[in-house]
Amino acid sequence: MHRRTPAAGIAGALLALALFVLSGCGDAITMTDVSDLEDEETLREFIEDHGFFDETEIYGADSMTSEPDTREEIDPLTFWREVTERHVVRDVYIDHEEGTAEVAIYKEIWGTLNIVDENMVEYEKPMHHEGVRYATFQLNDDVALADGNGNGGTHRHRRGRWTLTSISGLVANSVETLTMSIDWIHVQSATVDITITDPSLLMAVPDEIMHFELGEEVTVTVSGPPEDAILFLHTRRHRSPFQYVGGEFVGSWTVAHEGVHGAGVQALAHDSIHDSEYPDDSLIWGMPYEVGEEPE
């Protein structure tokens, strides 16, 4: 793994001539030069479409069922999140002499954490999260095409003249209240055995990206959150709770979809679900992974 691209370094290097706000979607992109418009737009579309940058599985609105617990004020039957607003800022610095681009992606999300107890009483708590991840790109002499999900075409990590060369994980958390912490995450399967201690570090693409085969069973172990924390594993179309075993949280999933994706571990404070007054208190670590071979 490589040292992450500091956000302050990117911001200091930017010669901002304009800030383009994309109407209706809350996205923004900082431009470096008018002549860079086409390259900036290509990189923006790459980040929007590529599965490594997708956090929607983590913030999906599907219900998540909890085991009843009588220790607190709320005995939750189910709970879920609803996103009402999403704002994305992509700081892009292009070095034409080196043929490289450095990108910092800042995300801010608003919505609600919804809880329904065993008496069918619904509680609604404000949700406000912010997150960041980093990426670097290399400029190529030729042009490559890829499909909208980064899962096909000439190269799954290319768009136009740009190739994704490294990417960090996603670190996101509740803004107003945060007590959750993660020390490390261990991911193990037949082909992967890796311990993650800092998801904000850049990883070389594709060499340092977790690579699975279809049908693989993956075990994820998390250390750091308190015993009464509520942890969920989010992968492509899959969401499941962790179990607390021997001082650590253990979860698993079966790889079922080819292509490039993002997986996430969400640690949620016990009282965020079991106490009607305690606010949303959560931490998310997200990591990119890919499945299957590069299309011919």
Image: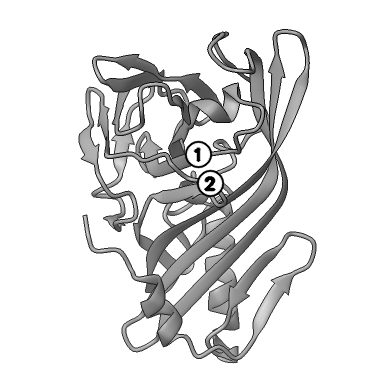
Q: Earlier in the sequence, mark 2 or mark 1?
A: 2
| Tag 2 secondary structure | loop
| Disc 2 to disc 1, C-alpha distance | 8 Å
Q: Is residue 192 left or right of residue 263?
A: left
Which residue in the protein does label 1 denote? 282
In depth, the one of 200 and 162 nearer the eye is 200
179 lies above or below 214 = below
Q: Is residue 125 left or right of residue 206?
A: right
Proximity of marks 2 and 1: CB atoms separated by less than 8 Å: no
130 lies above or below 287 = below
Q: How is the image coloured?
A: one colour
Which label sits in the foreground, 2 or 1? 2
Q: Can the viewer see residue 218?
A: no
Residue 80's disc is none
Q: Quadrant of residue 180?
A: top left
Taking the spot 74% from the left edge, 26% from the top edge, the residue there is: 123
In depth, the one of 243 and 70 nearer the eye is 70
Q: Quadrant of residue 210?
A: top left
> Which three-letter amino acid code belongs to the residue tagged 1?
Ser
Taking the spot 50% from the left edge, 63% from the top edge, the residue there is: 105
Residue 177's disc is 2
Q: Is residue 168 left or right of residue 195?
A: right
Residue 134 screen position, x and y as percent: 40, 62
Taking the spot 57% from the left edge, 17% from the top edge, the residue there is: 72
How many circles with numbers are drawn on the protein? Answer: 2
127 lies above or below 118 = below
Taking the spot 52% from the left edge, 86% from the top edge, the residue there is: 32
| Tag 1 secondary structure | strand
> Which three-letter amino acid code belongs to the residue tagged 2?
Thr
- Classify mark 2: residues with Cα within 10 Å, few (<14), some (14-19) or many (20+): some
